[in-house]
Structures are given as structure tokens and as C-alpha cells.
Image: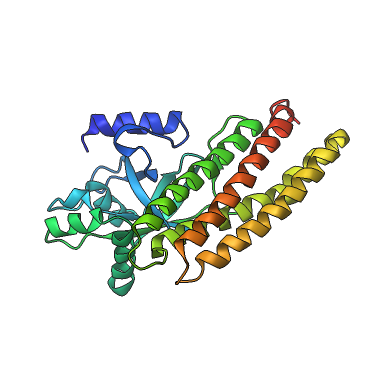
């Protein structure tokens, strides 16, 4: 992409905590900052990514099938420590270029989810690299891109909303277009990664934020009791979804219904939590 186009995307991404329109609307996008292999200067590039696990995401150096690897790939080979901006979080990561069977398996997974990757590979003689970005953040997903505790809660909630919306759209498309009667491998990974992230978020709230607020605001006890009950209910729904999508022969229709059940209850929970907690958090708790 031209530098001026990239800069527009970067500015929109940062201003809207990861949400962009136009060419990248509805895509999973991150900002990757590498160190120039020759200049030593930082370079930030919007890059599409694939969820993979709690502590790593995957990016593909396709350059739209160009004959040469993109500049950011050469940079991270020379300097594997990179900075990742996900919209909600910023964190340092270690870039690892995947090789052999692992590269081929993950690229095939990407192609199954989006045939455009195969079209890029057909356009070029080079083997398109797949790179894993391993988070180096300790004790959490990274620094939250927010200026207050209340904004931080909303930013994280909106990231969950956005990811769940993408999964719902993928479920709807996959259910109608499935030729095997099962979920695609990448879609299963997307769901499982979302479930793990939501579980970690609610665990952190239960262990840290809720006791913190309870100690300073005894009058908040009924609301916190409700939120804890909702955490338990959502945990049951998450486990139901994990069970379904963890099966390689999972039925897309069943998985979609589980996602819809989770979406309904999670949205109500997030909205109630924001109404109850953000005013206190923004007032300094």
C-alpha cells in the first residue's frame, strides 16, 4: 500500500481503537512496528492477522502476491522484536518465521478461511512467509490504549464486541457455504481464542477489579453480585461453545446457535457493567 494510504489507516485505527472503514472494514487488522533493517528507524504498517492462541497471532507476508517480500518482513527478520497495536492493547512481541510443515499447515488453514491467500501465492514464485508474533507482555495482554480506568473497560469490551461480530459474520457465511458440513479450522481457532480471552478477562475482573470496587463502594454490592452471577452464566455458555467448536466435525449450525446465545447474554452483561462501573472508575473509584 502507498505510504499516504497506510498513514490514513494508521491514524483512523488509533483514533477508533482498532476500528477502520474503507478497504479494511470488517477485517482483523493490527499495526505492526518494526525496526528498519538498514536505517534502524521504526516503521509502522497495517497488517491483517489470524488469531491463533492466547499469546500469539499470525501474519502473512503476502504483499498481494508481489514478486518480493514486503519491507516489514525483511525488517523483522533482521530485528525480531516488534511492537503490536491491536486497537485495545499495545505490546512488545517476538516475531518467528514459521517453516516447513507448520508454515504449510497454517497457510492451508488461512486459505480455507479466505481463498484470496491462495490467489496471492499463485501470482508469485516465492513461498509466502507466515510469521507468528509471540507476545512478550507479562501478566496480561499488554498496555490498554486508554486514558482512564473507565475508558479502559469500554475499550476492552468493544474489542470483544468487535471480535464476536466478526465471528458471527464468519459463522453465517460458513454455515451457508460449507461443503463439508463442518466448521473450518481457522474459524474454530477464532472461536476458541475468543473464548480464552473472555475467560481471562472475567477472571481478572473477579480477582482484582471487583474486590477493589467492593472495598471502596459497599453500596455497589448488589451490582457486583449480579455481575458475578452473570460471569458464571457466561462461563457456562463459553464452555458450551468450546465443546462444540473443539470437535473437528462440529456442525456449523449448532456452533452458530451457540454463538448467538453467547452474544445475547454477553452484550446485556457488558452494557450493564458499563452502566454500573464506568462512572465510578472515571471518578477515580
Q: Is residue 122 left or right of residue 79?
A: left
**Residue 48, relative to residue 112: is it above or below?**
above
Residue 107's quadrant in the figure? bottom left
Name the residue at 64% across, 46% down.
Answer: 265
| Residue 203 visible here | no
The percent coordinates of residue 205 (x first, y second) are 70, 47
Q: Residue lying at the far bottom in this picture: please name it.
A: 101
Against 236, is 268 above or below? Answer: above
Q: Quadrant of the N terminus?
A: top left
Q: Is residue 25 above or below residue 74?
A: above
In this view of the protein, can residue 111 be seen by the observer?
yes
Q: Residue furthest right?
A: 218
> Which of the two residues, 192 or 261, is positioned nearer the viewer here?
261
Residue 230 position, x and y percent, is 72, 48
Image-quadrant location for residue 22: top left
| Residue 116 in the image, given as x and y percentages of width and height | 24, 53
Residue placed most toward the observer, 237 or 63? 237
User: Which residue lies at the image location 56% right of the left edge and 36% below the top edge?
Assistant: 155
- x, y percentage for residue 114? 30, 55
Residue positioned 55% across, 50% down in the render: 260
- Name the residue at 42% across, 46% down: 84
Using residue 264 as the reference point, say whether residue 211 is left or right of it: right
Q: Quadrant of residue 20?
A: top left
Amino acid at each position: 500500500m502507498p505510504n499516504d494510504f497506510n498513514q490514513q489507516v494508521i491514524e483512523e485505527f488509533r483514533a477508533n481503537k482498532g476500528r477502520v472503514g474503507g478497504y479494511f472494514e470488517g477485517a482483523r487488522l493490527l499495526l505492526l512496528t518494526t525496526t528498519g533493517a538498514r536505517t534502524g528507524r521504526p516503521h509502522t504498517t497495517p497488517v491483517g492477522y489470524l488469531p491463533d492462541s492466547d499469546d500469539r497471532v499470525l501474519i502473512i507476508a503476502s504483499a498481494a502476491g508481489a514478486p518480493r517480500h514486503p519491507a516489514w518482513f525483511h525488517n523483522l527478520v533482521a530485528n525480531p522484536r516488534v511492537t503490536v497495536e491491536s486497537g485495545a492493547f499495545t505490546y512488545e512481541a517476538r516475531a518467528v518465521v514459521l517453516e516447513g510443515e507448520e508454515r504449510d499447515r497454517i497457510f492451508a488453514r488461512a486459505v480455507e478461511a479466505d481463498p484470496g491467500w491462495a490467489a496471492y501465492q499463485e501470482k508469485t514464485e516465492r513461498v509466502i512467509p507466515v510469521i507468528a508474533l509471540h507476545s512478550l507482555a507479562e501478566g496480561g495482554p499488554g498496555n490498554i490504549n486508554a486514558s482512564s480506568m473507565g475508558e479502559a473497560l469500554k475499550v476492552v469490551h468493544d474489542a470483544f464486541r468487535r471480535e464476536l461480530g466478526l465471528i458471527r459474520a464468519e459463522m453465517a457465511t460458513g454455515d451457508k457455504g460449507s461443503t463439508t458440513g463442518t466448521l473450518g479450522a481457522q474459524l474454530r481457532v477464532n472461536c476458541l481464542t475468543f473464548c480464552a480471552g473472555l475467560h481471562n478477562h472475567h477472571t481478572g475482573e473477579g480477582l482484582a477489579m471487583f474486590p477493589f470496587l467492593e472495598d471502596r463502594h459497599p453500596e455497589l454490592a448488589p451490582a457486583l453480585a449480579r455481575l458475578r452471577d452473570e460471569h458464571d452464566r457466561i462461563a457456562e455458555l463459553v464452555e458450551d461453545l468450546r465443546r462444540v467448536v473443539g470437535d473437528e466435525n462440529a456442525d456449523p449450525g449448532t456452533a452458530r446457535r451457540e454463538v448467538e446465545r453467547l452474544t445475547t447474554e454477553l452484550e446485556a452483561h457488558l452494557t450493564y457493567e458499563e452502566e454500573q462501573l464506568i462512572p465510578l472508575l472515571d471518578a477515580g473509584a
